[in-house]
Amino acid sequence: MEFMIKGWLYDHITLIWKDGELTGDQPEVLRIIKKRINKLEELKAILLCPETHLCYTENYLKEPFSAYLVLKHLLDVIYEEPDKKELLAHALLPAPPLSERSHAEYP
């Protein structure tokens, strides 16, 4: 999954989130954003979606919806954003059965 957000934080910036990785066209602003995300994670800040009541407390960039929420929180202005319903649908997909998870551990 991939999405793009265009906005403003000290300068115009285009951010692309793809499979847990965040990139942007303004390296200095991207560095500031990542530093702020790390600080929020250190503080165990809770990101809450008011419509769905989904909340996230760590690994904000891991999933598309939590990445969207944290970026929306950090940017001063957003000019273009992904379809929230599409990101939310991805967040609400049921987890695969244990037998299909690559990280499943068996005793």
Image: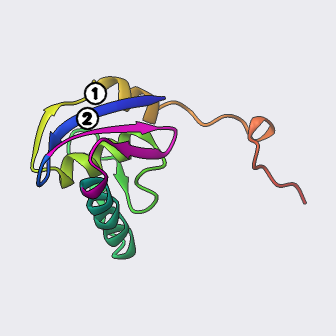
Does residue 16 show up magenta in the picture? yes
Query: Can I make out residue 48 in this image?
Result: no
Q: Position of residue 65 (x, y in %)?
A: 37, 40
Does residue 17 show up magenta in the picture? yes
In this view, the residue farthest toward the bottom is 43
Range covered by the magenta-colored residues: 12-28
Snapshot colouring: rainbow
Q: Which residue is mark 1?
A: 82
Q: CA distance from mark 2 to mark 1?
A: 7 Å
> Which residue is found at the position 76% from the left and 43% from the top?
102
Q: Position of residue 103 (x, y in %)?
A: 75, 49
> Which kind of residue does numbered mark 1 sit on?
Pro
Q: Which residue is mark 2?
A: 5
Q: In the image, is 47 to the left or to the right of 20?
A: left
Q: Position of residue 42 (x, y in %)?
A: 38, 75
In this view, the residue farthest toward the right is 107
- In the figure, residue 2 lies in which quadrant? top left
Q: Earlier in the sequence, mark 2 or mark 1?
A: 2
> Which residue is found at the position 28% from the left and 27% from the top?
82
> Which residue is found at the position 24% from the left and 55% from the top?
29
Decide: marks 2, 1 in contact (CB < 8 A)?
Answer: yes
Q: In the image, is 30 to the left or to the right of 23?
A: left
Instruction: Tell me: residue 34, above or below residue 95.
Output: below
- In the figure, residue 80 lies in which quadrant? top left
> Which residue is found at the position 22% from the left and 39% from the top?
51
